């Protein structure tokens, strides 16, 4: 059957989004249609306004500032000698929301699952090295490789550690163990092993 | 931490969509940002263009035609004496894609789970009755109540059947049984009972 062009176009684009398939995209189209004109316009505007988001020239996180630096990199209270390397912006946001990290970040962007860093990621690590040379005289205090502890995450973490070798007094990874609220019964062997080895 | 206004606004709106929570909305925002300006603009335009979609004055399905009628209602080859009453546009699309239904439809809109028809749904049923009176001389050949066979769906189906009583020679519901490719072992009792009673 013939589906209206406007819906087809919307579904084409929105079904490509992560976590949204063709069915969900159709549902969304009808949801917007039922919400009416004002809502559609507001949603479209909010999407179009994402173009105002810029990427920080230092850590590659997002911002809306005129000077090219994000809120964290332009904050003089942060300890710039400690750098957490994260994969995604959302990982950075999670770490920030703990309120327990006072250093700066480097956002690498989505890691591939084949165990090799992409050119863009190598360039970002290179820019961090240059920054450490220029701003910290060649040595950071600590680099925390805060990458998901999955099989491919660990692989990438090793690559990053190798790449950053010699640029910090200490290169660390996030601690492993039973998550708060988790159950020992359902923990996998690797997690339990870490939990036993790194007892509080 | 301070999140850029543009992202906050986007997340506010998109986290309200069915099947999309705050986390998924944030992921979408970053996805759009990484795709770049052209993609963002295209997606925003496709969303804004949904405003061109109109609702058929006869069956309440969607269309883009100037005369107020959808593709199905304006098609002279359809048998207008057989009417399928569906809940959602997507249900209509599923029935259409079988290619096995030649009648027209009535889209009711999302049914509530409390077992009462909303005013809008009553008005739509009323408009169908008026249409049957004017166009079919008071009696349709068949009304198929094609509502999901869930507990609340069945409840609503009974209400619809009661409402439409006397307007058709036959009022039917969709057949029940084991779905093609399904397994007897996992079928619930009601389904198996129907499958036994209505053997092919």
Image (cartoon, coloured by chain):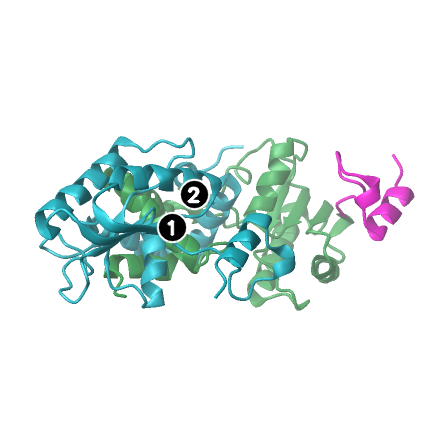
Chain colours: A cyan, B green
Identify the residue shown where x is 56% and y is 45%. B90
State the count of labels: 2
Give the percent coordinates (x, y) of residue B158.
75, 60
Which residue is tagged 1?
B27
B179 relative position to A33: left or right: right
At label 2, counting other C-alpha atoms closer than 10 Å, the crowd grade (few under 14, some 14-19, many 20 or more) is: few
Please report the bounds of the magenta region as a residue range: B173-200
Which residue is tagged 2?
A18
Q: Quadrant of the N terminus of chain B?
A: bottom left
Give the percent coordinates (x, y) of residue B198.
88, 42
Task: Answer whether labels 1 and 2 touch (C-beta < 8 Å).
Answer: yes
Q: Residue A120: within the magenta? A: no
Identify the residue shown where x is 36% and y is 31%. A116
Chain to which the residue tagged by mark 2 belongs = A
Is the same chain shared between marks 1 and 2?
no
Q: Quadrant of residue B151?
A: bottom right
Q: Secondary structure at mark 1?
A: helix
At label 1, counting other C-alpha atoms closer than 10 Å, the crowd grade (few under 14, some 14-19, many 20 or more) is: some
């Amino acid at each position: 059957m013939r589906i209206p062009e406007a819906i087809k176009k919307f579904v084409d684009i929105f079904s490509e989004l992560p976590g949204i398939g063709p069915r969900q995209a159709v549902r969304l189209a009808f949801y917007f249609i039922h919400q009416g004109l004002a809502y559609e316009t507001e949603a479209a505007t909010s999407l179009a306004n994402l173009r105002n988001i810029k990427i920080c020239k230092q850590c590659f996180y997002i911002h809306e500032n005129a000077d090219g630096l994000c809120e964290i990199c332009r904050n003089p209270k942060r300890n710039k000698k400690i750098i957490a390397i994260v994969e995604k912006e959302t990982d950075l946001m999670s770490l920030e929301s703990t309120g327990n990290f006072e250093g700066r970040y480097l956002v690498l962007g989505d890691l591939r699952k084949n165990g090799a860093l992409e050119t863009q990621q190598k360039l970002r690590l290179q820019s961090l090295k240059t920054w450490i040379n220029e701003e910290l005289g060649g040595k950071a205090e600590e680099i925390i490789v805060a990458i998901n502890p999955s099989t491919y995450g660990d692989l990438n973490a090793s690559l990053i550690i190798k790449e950053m070798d010699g640029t910090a007094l200490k290169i660390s990874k996030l601690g492993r163990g039973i998550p708060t609220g988790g159950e020992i019964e359902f923990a996998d062997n690797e997690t339990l092993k870490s939990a036993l080895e790194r007892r509080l």
